[in-house]
């Protein structure tokens, strides 16, 4: 019997909407899908404390686990309860260390280093970093003692946070897509699809303005309605042009839009945080076999370039114009990139990510 322990300091959402909630849900189910009996050590601290007692008793009684896979949250683990009170500040670290001592390899996915960037201090009340940053630093240091491998969103991420232990890139995955429907296209425009935010870190004003200059393209933007209504600048731009559409749909409603799309977009201005981030949405695009326009110099841009599944260009208006002209002139370029994206999609599912974890941690045990 293949068994593993899945550790996460919070409840697993059944129908997650945010990227941070999607990942633990998908990874947990991926381990089950590839044949593992999964012992869940999840929930808020009180619930985890009870589960930790049960698992440690099973280990003492001879139950064998192949590995422990853990994920943290964007909060320090000790403060991950809904009210952020650190009721059991060292419980989880001690548990992982005990598992290692029992001969069980431990891998932990380190989600976020937002706290290391100026953006963090700008987004919270002034006194919060005084409390949280020392905790974040101590937690990161502690991972060298309680894990065998730190899984990270990108290699750039691990290098930026200065982690000195063993690490491995484990980007997000996508759901395996089976497209069995067809939708009729009303014109022969090249269709670009974007799903996500529309302001702040996800400001898409520049690409919207540039694409509006090309009548041979149609851009569809899918975002939350409240985010769209709050963006008066973008609303004003889109109101004056006819090749940009805005929709507000849930993930399960996006199939027809993906089917009609030729290209997906993840083209944002660079910043230190984005250079390290590997967006979940990128792998949704890949899952649907859509090549992606992204920003060169970011982790997402590097991934696209390395796998030849789109175009990584500088965040520059003229470079985007040049790319759009070249694709409109020779649409076979899009077809070639699409074929390559479809080819790599099966290796970028959540189950494929779970298999990567199994391979890494099993080899450690051997």
Image (cartoon, grey):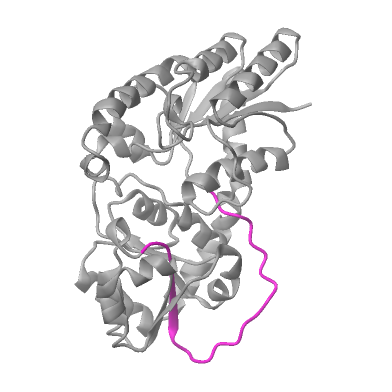
Q: Which of 237 and 217 is in front in this view?
A: 237
Say which residue appears at 38% left-offset and 56% top-offset: 305
Say which residue appears at 68% left-offset and 18% top-offset: 55
The stretch in magenta equals 173-197
Question: Could you say where residue 37 lies in the image, as x and y percent from the top left?
Answer: 74, 31
Question: Could you say where residue 1 lies in the image, as x and y percent from the top left?
Answer: 79, 26
**Image-based side of 133 in relation to 217, left or right:** left
Question: Could you say where residue 253 lies in the image, as x and y percent from the top left?
Answer: 59, 70
Vertical side of 54 occupied by 296: above or below: below
Vertical side of 140 occupied by 128: above or below: below
Vertical side of 318 occupied by 130: above or below: above
- Residue 167 in the magenta stretch? The answer is no
Image quadrant assignment for residue 136: top left
Say which residue appears at 73% left-offset and 14% top-offset: 58
Image quadrant assignment for residue 324: bottom left
Say which residue appears at 45% left-offset and 57% top-offset: 282
Mark yes or no: residue 320 visible. no
Question: Could you say where residue 312 lies in the image, as x and y percent from the top left?
Answer: 33, 61
Mark yes or no: residue 201 visible. yes
Q: Nearer the viewer, residue 48 or 242?
A: 48
């Amino acid at each position: 019997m293949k068994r593993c322990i899945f550790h996460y300091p919070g409840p697993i959402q059944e129908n997650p909407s945010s990227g941070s909630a999607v990942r633990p849900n998908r990874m947990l189910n991926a381990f089950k899908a590839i044949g593992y009996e999964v012992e869940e050590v999840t929930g808020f601290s009180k619930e985890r404390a009870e589960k930790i007692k049960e698992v440690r008793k099973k280990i003492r009684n001879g139950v064998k686990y192949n590995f422990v896979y853990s994920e943290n949250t964007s909060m320090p683990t000790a403060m991950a309860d809904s009210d952020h009170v650190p009721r059991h500040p060292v419980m989880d670290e001690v548990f992982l260390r005990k598992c290692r001592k029992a001969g069980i390899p431990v891998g932990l996915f380190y989600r976020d280093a937002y706290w290391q960037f100026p953006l963090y201090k700008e987004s919270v009340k002034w006194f919060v970093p005084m409390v949280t940053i020392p905790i974040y630093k101590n937690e990161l240091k502690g991972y060298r003692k309680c894990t065998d491998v730190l899984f990270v969103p990108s290699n750039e991420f691990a290098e930026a946070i200065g982690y000195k232990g063993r690490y491995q890139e484990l980007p997000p995955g996508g759901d395996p897509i089976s497209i069995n429907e067809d939708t009729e296209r009303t014109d022969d425009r090249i269709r670009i699809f974007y799903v996500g935010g529309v302001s702040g870190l996800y400001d898409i004003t520049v690409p919207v303005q540039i694409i509006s200059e090309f009548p041979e393209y149609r851009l569809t933007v899918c975002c939350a309605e409240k985010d769209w209504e709050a963006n008066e600048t973008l609303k004003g731009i889109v109101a004056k042009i006819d090749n940009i559409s805005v929709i507000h749909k849930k993930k399960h409603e996006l199939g027809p839009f993906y089917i009609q799309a030729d290209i997906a977009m993840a083209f944002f201005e660079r910043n230190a945080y984005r250079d390290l981030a590997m967006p979940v949405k990128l792998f949704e695009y890949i899952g649907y076999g859509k090549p992606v326009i992204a920003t060169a110099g970011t982790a997402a841009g590097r991934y696209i370039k390395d796998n030849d599944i789109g175009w990584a260009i500088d965040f520059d208006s003229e470079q985007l114009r040049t790319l759009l002209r070249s694709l409109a002139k020779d649409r076979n370029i899009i077809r070639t990139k699409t074929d390559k994206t479809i080819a790599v999609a099966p290796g970028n599912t959540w189950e494929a990510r779970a298999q990567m974890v199994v391979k890494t941690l099993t080899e450690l045990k051997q």
